[in-house]
Image (spheres, helix red, strand yellow):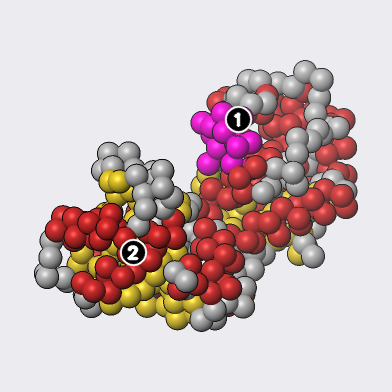
Amino acid sequence: MVEDEKNMIIVRYGEIFLKSEFVRKKFVEKLVSDIESKLKRSRIKNKIYKQRHRIFIKLYSKDDLGLGLDVLKRTFGIKSVSPAIETSSDLQSLKEKTIELADKILSENDTFAIRVTRENYESYTSKELEEILGREVLKNVKCKGVNLTKPKKTIFVEIRGDKAYIFTKKIRCYGGLPYGSQGKVLCLLSGGIDSAVATFLAMKRGCEPIVLTFAKNENDAKIVKKIVEKLQEYSPSEILAYKAEISKALKEIKEKAGKYTCIICKRLMLRVAAKLCEDLKIKAIVTGDNLGQVASQTLENLSSIDAVTEKLVLRPLIFYDKEEIISIARDIGSYELGAARSCEFVPRKPATAARIEKIIEIENSICIEKIAEEMKIERLK
């Protein structure tokens, strides 16, 4: 049966293709390494080999195809994948395998088209092969006929030298850049919806996340741990996570800060995060801030918050609509883990345009630098 022969997966990368030859080679090697690590973790035996603009994965067991595709769909740097039949590129083999596949997928009411691409193959042009293979299907398979504009089913034939790969679908993946290719970032993960999506987007752009959560209680820490475990599905290596206990500091801040509580809290978090960045040699901090979503996320307040550190603060969600963020959270599986949560320390009428002089005055009155210095950070286990 044709379906049983689909133990080959074609991997395509998108943005990597646009890089210089040196960078492209480096990124492809990193992507292959990520694929190897993730397939090994899933106990999928395979053989990987590279060709121009493609990575091919041969699975030793056809039973691993479904799991293998799931793993690859969660691997950053991959644009799309296709489960394919591998065969010889001689004309007779192409005819036989195309007919077998067409017989498997076409019904009497289906129209079809054949799309051929070639590399290092000069026996026929792509158009000639499409016509030859199309005629063979029409002669041997009951169907409605050819429709080159809007076919019900499409059979793709990709020829590379003496090998050919025949498939029917291109499964979209997340794209982006290979994991870790852009270095490490410290992601502030609250356990809510936004920060998990921000961390995911940082990973998609090639960053390796180190997670820091400011837990008010053990339940907060447990939620973050579950989100980290979910994000781990997209990573070829362990995601390190840390926690800092902040409830005691928040009680003191709220007593003195009033409507400025959220801004001073965020500045405290950045102080602590910047210190951890120095210890771990990390150059940037990632947050889930979204412009105008809450009082602390106005332009004025974000500027006041950032003023506390010289570290680069990245905000992947800054211009996203809430619906877009929720859609991504549902897609990656973090939404149910980090549903909308409220904070008991938020003032009834928080400041939307705080004066930096007032903030510094309050911080000095509660010795905020000492609070930040004494805040204990430990591994989240």
Residue that appears at 77% across and 18% down:
349
Of labels 1 and 2, earlier in sequence is 2
Residue that appears at 28% across and 74% down:
93
Q: Nearer the viewer, mark 1 or mark 2?
A: 2
Decide whether residue 319 is among the magenta residues: yes
Task: Please name the residue that numbered disc 1 is placed on.
Answer: 323
- Tag 1: residue type? Glu
Residue that appears at 48% across and 67% down:
3
- Tag 2: residue type? Ile
Closer to the camera in the image, 14 or 351: 14
The secondary element bearing badge 2 is classed as helix
Decide whether residue 72 is among the magenta residues: no
Tell me where the magenta segment starts and ends, as one range.
Answer: 316-329
Q: Residues within 10 Å of mark 2 (few under 14, many from 20)?
A: many
Q: CA distance from mark 1 to mark 2?
A: 45 Å
Left or right of 114, for residue 170: right
Closer to the camera in the image, 205 or 34: 34
Q: Position of residue 344 (x, y in %)?
A: 86, 32
Furthest residue toward top: 349
Disc 1 vs disc 2: Cβ atoms closer than 8 Å?
Answer: no
Task: Please name the residue that numbered disc 2 is placed on.
Answer: 99
The secondary element bearing badge 1 is classed as helix
Residue 3 seen in the figure = yes
Q: Position of residue 266 (x, y in %)?
A: 69, 38
Q: Residues within 10 Å of mark 1 (few under 14, many from 20)?
A: few
Q: Is residue 65 above or below residue 325?
A: below
Image quadrant where residue 267 sits: top right
Q: Position of residue 341 (x, y in %)?
A: 79, 36
- Specify the quadrant that holds the C terminus: bottom right
Residue that appears at 64% across and 56% down:
231
